[in-house]
Amino acid sequence: MKIKLFTLGLLLVMFAACSSKDDAAQPKPSGYFRIELPNHQYNKFDTTALPFTFDYAKCAECTVDRKSDTATWVLVHYPKQNATIEMLYKTAADSNGLTQLMLADKDFVEFHYQKASGVVTHDFRELGAKADVSGLFYDISGKDVACPFHYWMTDQQHNFVRATLYFHFTPNNDSVQPVIDYIRDDAMRMVKTFEWR
């Protein structure tokens, strides 16, 4: 008798559970995979081969590649994020040469307007850079932009550096936004600690 009552009770519970309209199957919303990022810690980039120093992330690898007497690449590579901040250092003979470098940089940023949904420009003074470091920082937003941020800096005499974040895969900036924000924080540290010798 107890077994029959138990079976009947179990059937009633199962029937009640299956007949509820509120528990109908719902599709899961689309989402992106979770990205684990390390805490921000920094090393100092300091080499006698170049007339500047700055802090860069400990989780990154920093290398120097001299292309010519007037052009040197400093690559800050994030292996786990498959991204690199590519910094190009150039010298100019005079202020006219510096102006030409700045205009070429402006053309570079404007090239990204076709894919960008917005570009916000920040002067280095408002970002807390050292007094002898002038420059502009560009936040370039948009799902498919190739470089989510770009900046340049100069001593207003002979030295010029421009830096751009690139991912080594086809960008979908919606899915990698946490990585962009993380590396942007590191770039802000670079800007604030950048010093000319």
Image (cartoon, grey):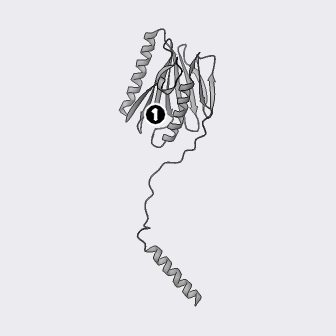
Q: Residue 106: give x, y in percent of width and height.
A: 40, 22
Residue occupying image coordinates x 49% and y 81%: 12
* Residue 49, image quadrant: top right
- Residue drawn at x 56%, y 24% is 74
With 77 as the anchor, is 96 left or right in this view? Answer: left
Residue furthest top in the image? 94
Q: Residue furthest bottom?
A: 1
Q: Quadrant of residue 59?
A: top right
Q: Residue at x 61, y 39 (%)?
A: 39
- Which quadrant is home to the C terminus? top right
Q: Is residue 2 left or right of residue 99?
A: right
Residue 125 image position (x, y, % from top left): 48, 23
Residue 116 visible, this angle: no
Rendered view: 193 above or below 7: above
Query: Is 55 displayed left or right of 97 in the figure?
Result: right
Q: Residue furthest left?
A: 114
Instruction: Residue type at mark 1: give it.
Output: Pro
| 154 to 86, vertically: above or below | above
Which is nearer the eye, 130 or 64?
Answer: 130
- From this view, report whether residue 96 is shown above or below residue 188: above
- Residue annotated with mark 1: 148
Q: Locate the N terminus and report the quarter of the image it occupies.
A: bottom right
